[in-house]
Image: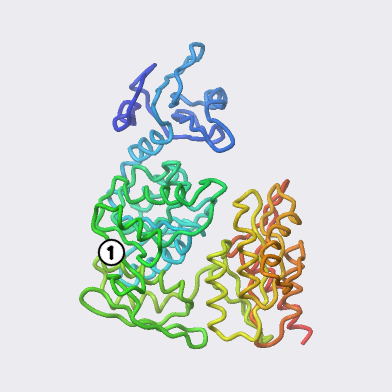
Amino acid sequence: MTLKELLSEIQVVRFWGQPDLDISGIAYSSHLVEPGNIFVAVKGLKADGYDFIPEAKQKGATAIVSERQKPEELDLTWIQVPDAREALALISATFYGHPALKLKTIGITGTKGKTTVSYILEAILQAAGLNPGVIGTIDYRWNNQRCAAPRTTPEAPDIQKILKQMVDSGVSHCVLEVSSHSLELKRVLGIGFDLAIFTNLSGEHLDYHQTMENYFEAKKKLFFLNHKRQASIVNIDDVWGQKLISELPMRTITFGFRPEALVRIESFEIAGREMKAQVSYPGGRLNFKTKLIGRHNLYNFLAATSAALVLGISPQAIVKGISQLESIPGRLEFVPNSLGLSVIVDYAHTDNALENLLLAVRSLNPTRIILIFGCGGDRDRSKRPRMGEVAAHLADWTIITSDNPRSEDPEKIIKDIEQGFLKVGSKNYESIVDRRSAIQKALVMAAPGDFVVIAGKGHETYQIFKDQTLPFSDYGIALEIIKKLEEKK
């Protein structure tokens, strides 16, 4: 593709150089530059791409996109733009031939539930005989291909490349988890979404967004992008969902428990490790049963069901898809054992998510809940005492431990969490810094009928420290310890 063609949809402030250059690819990091690439110098959270232009040139970049003017001494084609991130997204869509236009695309945003909704909707679409792909927190997958997901929503060139690969392999629908960071950083600009789903909003990422209002405004951007929209789908029971509904100028499908919700739960019951529910929608009702338990999961089912109905999926396929979904990695995932214990691994890493998780476990009538959790370092510190307070109220015993401490002192993070216990005068906890040792202690002290809940990291297979990242899987570690305990029986 020529540079002139590539720039056809972006605003150019000033151009220096040759418009007919052949462009072989797009790079946003100097490490990724290959000969013939255009290098877009975006400013990151810790570094500015402008500082890496010499390296990009050395590696073979033939054109530079930047918000700054061309330095006189640099002999290279240069495109000055008002917004480098916007330019990156739009030229990426152009380079890969706007693949989103050839797919049904569904964007899911919100604090909790994005991953679960994506799995449910994927299962429903498959049950309907369609061929969905997913770009999400756990992985990027389509047609039995799976790629590791370094971030929930990739950078714009990576998203467009994946969408192009999906189109080429016959994918019919793409379900994307859309993070607040990706919306702020314009990674999904240039994707026309058929549906946009809002799950909920609670305290998270406030180290980045500073206030809940800013966080909400970031999420709201999904609903005002260049859509092919059939509808917006919003949780009417969530206070931020209600605010969003009041600000949306387009057709909105609401879901929840409230009587005015268009798609709503009429009744549900949890028996053993199975949940049954009846859902009403304009024109009918459907009944389903599932192994994904908990009131919070009912909202996830409503969101996916709403989307499926708008897409014209039959109620029969919706029920079939839901019933066939056995589990989701790191989401209320049970670890098998013969010790009479119920051991659960879950990704809950906010106070609201931890509360929902523990309430779901309480509905299963445990003898005791033994909870292991920590909080990530270099992330929103305000949630730490809130999570401690939730644990104090809803768990019988808590072991506070490390999560991904990153550059912070793990013991300092634990002290922050401990403030929540102290606030309510609770002493039903202990602290063990080493996460493996904490899981070991919980499993050893547990008795038949107890639930051991390992929260915070879910599907993750690593632990991040200041100077290294080490392999670590809560599920794998728990299984390993359980096998040793089983051998001693």
Q: Does residue 170 show up? A: no
Residue 348 placed where, x, y %?
56, 65
Residue 259 placed where, x, y %?
30, 75
In the rendered image, the vertical position of residue 51 relative to residue 225, given as above or below: above
* Location of residue 118 by image quarter: bottom left
Q: Does residue 119 show up? A: yes
How crowded is the residue under tag 1: few (<14 C-alpha within 10 Å), some, or many (20+)? many
In the rendered image, the vertical position of residue 308 relative to residue 221, given as above or below: below
Residue 280 placed where, x, y %?
28, 78
Residue at 36%, 57% in the rendered image:
243
User: Position of 469 compared to 243: left or right?
Assistant: right
User: Position of 339 compared to 239: left or right?
Assistant: right
Q: Which residue is mark 1?
A: 253
| Front-lying residue, 243 or 261 | 243
In the rendered image, the vertical position of residue 192 relative to residue 197, given as above or below: above
- The local secondary structure at tag 1 comes to strand
Residue 486 placed where, x, y %?
73, 83
* Location of residue 485 by image quarter: bottom right
Residue at 39%, 66% in the rendered image:
122
* Location of residue 189 by image quarter: top left
Image quarter where the C terminus lies is bottom right
User: Position of 326 compared to 372: left or right?
Assistant: left
- Outermost left residue: 283
| Front-lying residue, 112 or 133 | 112
Number of marks in picture: 1
| Front-lying residue, 453 or 326 | 453
Kind of residue sitting beneath label 1: Ile
- Outermost top residue: 72
Image quarter where the N terminus lies is top left
